[in-house]
Image (cartoon, rainbow, N blue to C red):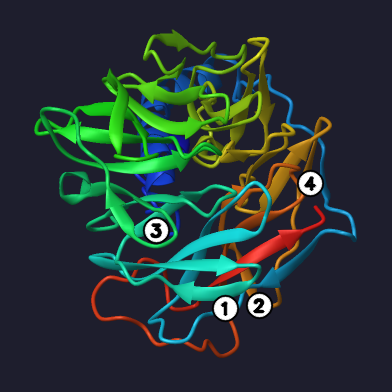
Amino acid sequence: MIEDTLQRYARQDVPPSRLQAADVLVEARRRNRRRTRLTGAVAGAATVLAAFGGVAVVRAVVTAPIAAAGAGCTVVQLEIPGGTSGGVVASGIDPSGRYVIGKTGARDAPRAVLWTDGIPAVLREAFTPQAVNASGVIAGFTGPDRHGGEAQQRPVVHDGTRLVQLPLPDGATGGAAYAVNGHGDVLGTAVRADGSPIAVRWRTGGTAAIVTTVAGASGLGLTDDGVAVGFDLPNPHPLRWAADGVTTALPVPRGAESATAAAAAGDWAVGDATLPPTGSKDDLTAEAAVRWNLRTGAVELIPGVGGHRVSASGTVAGTTGTGAPALWHGGRIFTLPLPPGAAQFNVTLSGITADGHGLAGGVEISAGPIATSGPNGDPVVSDRTVPVLWHGC
């Protein structure tokens, strides 16, 4: 019976439809590793249970204490701009909190939304926004907003007045920009015809140009000091590199089998860890973040919450194993409030301010009217998804 149950959980693959493109890549790698390890652990779990009279072996990793965020932490729904079709999700926030980006529409024709001091506007050009800096420069990509559509995507920046396509390295067929720092430098990932990735750093001041490339790696996070983070493939391992493109492996923390670096700000980088399998169905939903200090090289494992974003102050944002949005700081996990009617399992956290107190994302409302009507084709988010901000957390 236990073997059948574990095999059934190992085969599950819930599509992370509300995640940003960069998060989809990280999540897909993590789910594949979990399925592989859980399937391989089934026979071992049965052996352990038999040998020890049915007593299962428990992973020796302690989850940080979890509590609800304080009363000062509030959630508000962003205004949905007129003329949108279907749901809308906030996909990033600048370090100051003034600019929030989002997306709506169909996956094959996504539309970008920009909120400036809370006032929304649908940008004229069709593209998927991924990151925004304090000057309002947006990094993202044109083409389909779907995992597997990388060859049809093109990296772009929106400089406040126009959309600028970024050059691809030789041999690349497509790509996407995932991060932009305070200087307007951009980091992303290009793909070759064989599907292999190339991390790319662009300079966008003046004529857009490639600064460096890292073959076999995905570029996902970029600090104002110019430190880039990501991971290499096909066996993911977290990496960092400077403008010269020389890579350094980031350490995997004790208690984790592997890790990926997904975001960076200030002296910090963050990502997700894969924990050793226990043979339990909970292996598929176990969350653990990794936080690196890019200045000192220190690394720490944070069980209980995923490492989706990090603030310049070192606060980690992610979701718990039950899907609740949460922050980690001071050695504790704090779950964030949800608006009325929101479903806990349908929440996205996609950006955090420099001080760690403001966040952007989206929630799916299970009850009540929604002002927009669904687009034709496959939508980027469900028509019940609304953009939200958390303040004072």
Location of residue 253 by image quarter: top right
**Which residue is at a point 79% across and 46% down the rendered structure image?**
334
Instruction: Say which amino acid is labelled 1.
Output: Ser
**Which residue is at a point 40% across and 79% down the rendered structure image?**
86
Query: Which residue is identified by label 4?
Result: 334
User: Dot 2: what SS?
Assistant: loop
Query: Which residue is identified by label 1?
Result: 366
Query: Which residue is identified by label 2?
Result: 341
Query: Which residue is identified by label 3?
Result: 17
Q: Position of residue 388 (x, y in %)?
A: 63, 67
**Which residue is at a point 56% across and 18% down the rendered structure image?**
256
Of pointers 3 and 2, the one earlier in the residue sequence: 3
Going by the picture, which residue comes out furthest to the front? 206
> Mark 1 or mark 4: which is in front?
4
Disc 2/disc 4 C-alpha distance (Å): 20 Å
Instruction: Say which amino acid is labelled 4.
Output: Phe
User: Dot 3: what SS?
Assistant: loop
Disc 3/disc 1 C-alpha distance (Å): 17 Å
Of pointers 3 and 1, the one earlier in the residue sequence: 3
| Residue 147 seen in the current view | no
Q: Please report contact status of discs 2 and 1: CB closer than 8 Å, yes or no.
A: yes
Of pointers 4 and 3, the one earlier in the residue sequence: 3
**Which residue is at a point 33% across and 19% down the rendered structure image?**
235
Neighbour tally class for label 1: few under 14, some 14-19, many 20 plus, Cα within 10 Å: some
